[in-house]
Image: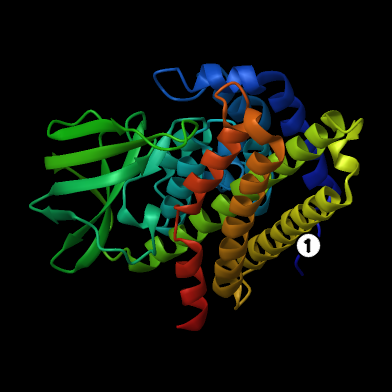
Amino acid sequence: MTDLVPTREHTELASAVRNLLDRRSDSRSVRRAIEQPTGFDTDLWSTLCDQIGAAALAIPEEHGGAGFTLAETYVVLEELGRALTPSPLLPSVVTSAALVSAGGQGPLLERIAGGAIATLAWSGVTGPADTAAEVTWSDGALHGSVSPVLCGDVAEILLVPAHHDGGIGLFSVDPTAAGLTRTRVAGLDPTISFAGLTLDGVPAEVIELDAANVLATTHLVGTLSTTALQVGCAQRGLDMTVDYTKQREQFGRPIGSFQALKHRMADLLVGVQMSRAGAWAAVQAHVHGAPNADRLAAAAASYCGESAMAVAAETIQLHGGIAITWEHDAHLVLKRAQALNQLFGLPHQQRAALIF
């Protein structure tokens, strides 16, 4: 039976993460973090892993994890989305899902559970799971390039899908290996870091030679994880906008008291709540192995992506001129929504998956 609403344990987990982020990931902290060489606050990441177990939640206990499910990880990701926190949790969750789906790789999973930054370097991060990769494997080495890769320049564990004579496989690469070049790629959203990877005869360890199903499952996990970040981002935009319209006065009264603006914010609330309900239903369907899990994920991703963009646009509009200044966080909401909209398939691509 699926949990149609978060349980008390989920609520308590969300509260614990929110309390931590309120202290350690406020606006000033986020701006400091994006200036770091890693693109995120390494101390906060360590705290999330040590005290919350964020990276270990969905990893089986026999591989050093907490033995929970993607639902618990979803709760943490939504709070990270709400705080606009720069974090390597998304690529680490995707990578651990690939390893679990491939049947183990205990030592790598144990490292991820302990907080090692991991990423999966594949074209599917910006589109469908079957997006053609530009990397090939022959004679035990990888050749080609792939971009953009989430946290690709700072990852300590690196998995690379590649074509070979028998199809598409999944391989593990030492991030310090000769022939591997990792270059930070500038993006719209400063809170999400990407890199381009060039592989010139890089030695690789085989994880799975027939990885088509592994990548499909991994793409689904990435899609659902992204919806959590989108719901959190939309909630942040709504909260900021409601607070601002209570304070900003025009004609001697708060602009939030104007009926036209009440209607607009009511529409935003509906969008956020619908996104949360759809994303949670999709995550629960995945956790419980429902036969329609893929379709629910595509529907949630389509709705959450467009809803987050709509909320972000209204956040800019309803804040007025101050929203386009660097000092205000409204532009960070818009940039985060736009960046997340590109991950694991655009809304129209998700809708296409429901048709074909």
Tally the marks.
1
> At x 66% / y 49%, what residue is drawn?
311
Instruction: Give x and y (percent) for residue 249.
Output: 85, 30
Q: Quadrant of residue 305?
A: bottom right
Instruction: Give x and y (percent) for residue 76.
Output: 66, 40
Residue 70 in view in this figure:
no
Quadrant in which the C terminus is drawn:
bottom left
- Few, some or many residues within 10 Å of mark 1 (<14, 14–19, 20+): few
At mark 1, the secondary structure is loop
Where does label 1 land, which residue?
Answer: 3
> At x 19% / y 46%, what residue is drawn?
145
Instruction: Give x and y (percent) for residue 39.
Output: 44, 25
The answer to whether residue 121 is left or right of residue 59 is left
> At x 34% / y 33%, what residue is drawn?
186
> At x 55% / y 20%, what residue is drawn?
31
Instruction: Give x and y (percent) for residue 25.
Output: 64, 23
